Amino acid sequence: MPKTPDIDVIWKALADPTRRGILDELASGPLTTGDLVERFSKLCRTAVMKHLDLLEGAELVVVRREGRVRWNHLNPMPIQRIYDRWVSRHIRDMASALSRLKDHVESPAAKSPSSPTKKRRGASSGK
């Protein structure tokens, strides 16, 4: 059974905008290395290969060879690990806080005419 990459390796791979761009390109389906070199025309083939090697090391890209052709496939599982470990927890906390704020703002006490906000407004208008 292959060892799962350390989460730091995944973060490092995702930190580079070119590598994120490669992953974005692969999201619509597998591409050959030649296809990716064409799409990233500002980079030489060697640079694209280095980025792909790092993405493969982080298991974000799975490579399948057909003769001399190297097909690169997106593997979303490491991104799911990042989501499960970090993003989902923070979204839950933020959503919970927003829900509590919404409940407070919409509560009858917040809407009542005797609330401190309404009294201050009336007092400042001279009524």
Image: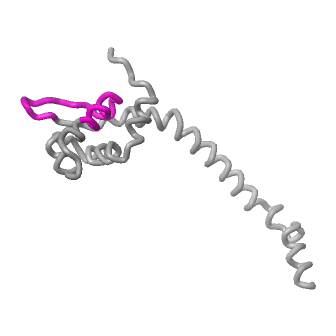
Q: Which region of the structure is painted magenta?
A: 50-70
Viewer-proximal residue among 8 and 61: 8
* Numbered circles on residues, count: 0
At 14% from the left and 43% from the top, the residue drawn is 34
Q: Is residue 99 above or below residue 126?
A: above
Viewer-proximal residue among 32 and 54: 54
Viewer-proximal residue among 45 and 10: 45
At 37% from the left and 47% from the top, the residue drawn is 17
Q: Position of residue 24 (x, y in %)?
A: 31, 47
At 41% from the left and 33% from the top, the residue drawn is 10
Viewer-proximal residue among 10 and 102: 10
Quarter placement of the N terminus: top left
Residue 69 magenta-highlighted: yes
Q: Position of residue 61 (x, y in %)?
A: 28, 34
At 80% from the left and 63% from the top, the residue drawn is 110
Q: Residue furthest left?
A: 67
Is 93 on the left-hand or right-hand side of 1? right
Q: Residue furthest bottom?
A: 126
Q: Position of residue 69 (x, y in %)?
A: 10, 34
Q: Position of residue 3 (x, y in %)?
A: 37, 18
Asked which quadrant contains residue 16, the reply is: top left
Q: Residue furthest top?
A: 1
